[in-house]
Amino acid sequence: MIQLVQVLLLGLMLGGVYALMASGLTLIFGVMRIVNIAHAAFILFAAYLAFWAFKIYHIDPMVSVLFTMPLMFFLGMGIYKLVFPRIGESRQFTSMTVLLTFSLALIVEGVMGFLYSGIYRSANPPYTTRALLLGPFYLPAAQLYATLLSLILLGVLFLFLRFTRTGRAIRATMQNRTAAQIVGVDVERISTLAFGIGMALAGASGSLVSFLFTFFPAKHWQWIGTLLALIVLGGMGSLSGSVVGAFLLAVVAAYLGHFYGPTWSPITFYLALFLILLIRPQGLFGKKLEA
Amino acid sequence: MLLAVENVTAGYGAGPNILEGVSIEVEQGKSYCIIGPNGAGKSTLLRTICGLLRPRSGRIIFKGEVLNGLRPDQILRRGICFVPQDRSLFPEMTVRENLLMAGYSLTNKRELEDRIQAVFEVFPALKERRSQPAQTLSGGEQQMLAMARALILKPDLVMLDEPSLGLAPMVAAQVFESIRRLKALGMTVLLVEQNARKGLECADWGYVLDLGRNRFQGPAHMLLRDPQIAELYLGRRMDTRRREQSRSPEQGVEGP
Amino acid sequence: MPENPLTEEVLDAREEAYLRPAAKPTVDSRKFFLSSLLLVLALFPVLQIVSGQFNYWLHMLLFTFMNITMAASWNIIGGYTGYISLGHNVFSGMGGYVAGALLVFYGLSPFLTAPLAGAFAFLLGLLVGLITLRTRGSAFIIATIALVLLAKLGLDNLELLGGTNGVSLPLPPLPARVVKLPFYYGMLLTAVGAVYTSYRIRHSKFGLGLRAIAQDETKAEVAGIPTSQYKILAFAISAFFPGMAGALWAYYLTYLRPTIYFAVLGAAEVVLMTLLGGRGTVSGPVLGAALLVILNEFFVAKFGSTELNIAGTGLLMLLVLLFFPDGIVGTLRERRKLPRFLDWG
């Protein structure tokens, strides 16, 4: 019994980080109907930045969030402005975004591989080897801190979206783009902003990833599969859905990994993806994904 | 002349023209109804005026300024408020949040609050439901909310696209009542209606569009009585003489 | 503004003119070009038999034929039907593994089992299509990425076939001078098969239905086209020749390894080839495949490193998507400058 709860806790510890990763992707899709295949690649990019900051300047990865977020925010807005206005309102818009972001992912991967080579990296601040004891359960310190930070950031995001004028404009654009235009929202500006925020979330995720996992340039393909499964499960375009889906799948993966071995964890997410598409394409909370 | 649409052509994407040179004029303080068969371009016309669609040729002049090429939010700030066919509410936001969003372009928070209160006076049913998500409202209430949003902005011109669409007759009657209330408040209303009879009944002037072109226009009450228009667009009137005629072999039905 | 409105008559006339076989002189010049090209390609290996110096060229050509097979087949689902598959090399990979397994465990030569590998890929396509083609556009694309990643993971864990390290295959029993020849002809035949199938589909009612689906699936459904069946069939067909080519390629490489066979980059290159040449045309994928092989060789010769290769592929794809979405053949056709010998449909 204790084993089972322990596994549950381990799953929940990771769920927070997955939720953070997924939230950026969901925000970008929700506001602009862009399926950002490059999201995990950008997370990795931020992870490399955080890693080098740790290695060379001894900046704690959790602290690095303070610069990865703003950096990715501006980078995101720049990329959005550069790449996406051209495809406008073509009928196969969402499919086009998949292809475009796919190319972006390749570019980022190639550049990272060139700059940092394919060696496996991982930052290792002191807390990666520590664990907290909670009764009979142990909580790895790294995962705990990461999830707490994720929850804080997600909380800030929630407050921003709920209670500020701009946040409301973003939510409005997510719910009904035409209506938002009609009430006077400059949807282009909001879209650029939303992309920036999504990237900032990726930046924060990257900082956390740098000490939670071992990574190398091609690893983003593994994560993007996971993330896409997450948001398809939660329902693309639903932030609450992606958070719930993240915790859910993290726990399921933890159990499968515990009973069947570590290689089964990633497979969970892909199988989940196919299963969901088969049974309930619109996910738990969301709208159907159209062309 | 508040709004002048001069010989406008428009279409969607790379597709063919939906509007083939349409012209209408809207005077301040009056109400207008545009009727016509499906595909005539009525909704397209409204979408073009409010900036969701760009005119391919022709001009749209509002308060002396040419609107061609402006974004919808820019056109909104100039005083045109558009209530689309699907009402375009924010489904997961509450009634109050929807009204807050309606006032997005207003910078004065106090002013916005006052207007929201004023709107609740006009539509007390909405006040009751102010914390409910918009998607939980009934069809008629959603339409009310859509119009309430229009009121928040105190626009110079309100454009309504098929407000009674999909609503049961009794609920639709509520909607037309609300439109009459807008009129009474002195708003300039431009209405597109599938229910031509009801639509013309709350308008001063009517336009008939067909296949993207102007067909007829005139005072609304005259259009209602015109037999030709009745036959073409309002559905034939059943009166006893016609029922008798239909018993005998036919050469088509003519006007009474 | 279009000159004539899109009425039924206009559409019917355009479709008729399209399906009507081209006027005589055009057919002759294209047939001439194709027959002479095929003749040259068929006789080319003689040079190798005679002089022994042409192995590199044989390699490049058969590699090109393989790419042509992949691109032309991908075009059936990605070009004609408009459903982008970003994991298409899963079919060539699985074909390779099936043939490889049959070779290792039963001693059957992949030259015999290639059609079987193709059939396996076809069935896989049917199965996957049944699951994933219930969704539209972008969900399908995501599913194809997941498919190739899943295949890689699955085979990484399959100790029977070597897991992540893969397994070596026995070498074909031929002297070095002529060992490439059967592969050359095998790939050539597969490529011809793929392109011919693409051509026949393009000029058939099935192909017309596929293009209707690409334009507007809802309208196609309403018009009575059995969209689900068509889509799934197109996907399955698009898997067959890659399956065969994969089988031959495995024997040619003489080993099976998941990272090589199921690399996302490979899938990206297939898409890029077709986009570059011209999606939805018959000659586009052929041109794009040949062009990409040449570009690749050039870049590797000049710059060498592999990571920038990835970035370069991505960049090229991005540029083509943004500025050149119809590809070479597509753009030329738009501007009515398409030379006749490239106009196969």
Image (cartoon, coloured by chain):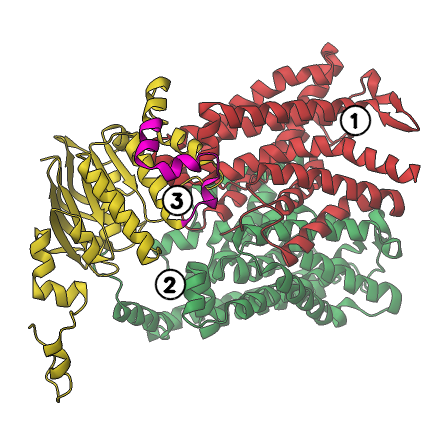
Chain colours: A red, B yellow, C green
Q: Is residue C108 left or right of residue A219?
A: right
Mark toward the viewer: 2 or 3: 3
Which residue position is annotated with label 1? A143
Local SS, label 3: loop
Q: Is residue B46 left or right of residue B230?
A: right
- Identify the chain of the residue marked 2, using the numbered disc in the image: C
User: Which numbered disc, 1 or 3, marks the residue that appears first in the sequence?
Assistant: 3
Dot 3 alpha-carbon crowd within 10 angstroms: few under 14, some 14 to 19, many 20 or more: few
> Which residue: 61% across, 66% down?
C236
Dot 1 alpha-carbon crowd within 10 angstroms: few under 14, some 14 to 19, many 20 or more: many
Residue C317 at what x, y percent from top left? 52, 42
User: Visible in this render: residue C340?
Assistant: yes
Residue B234 part of the magenta-drawn span? no
Mark 2 to mark 3 CA distance (whole Å): 34 Å
Which residue position is annotated with label 3? A89
User: Visible in this render: residue C39?
Assistant: no
Q: Which residues are magenta?
A: B116-138
Identify whether A172 is placed above or below B139: above
Residue B125 part of the magenta-drawn span? yes
Mark 2 and mark 1 residues within 8 Å of each other at the beta carbon: no
Q: Is residue C6 left or right of residue C314?
A: left
How would you classify the magenta stretch by its main secondary structure?
helix
Are callouts 2 and 1 both on one chain? no
Local SS, label 2: helix
Are callouts 2 and 3 both on one chain? no
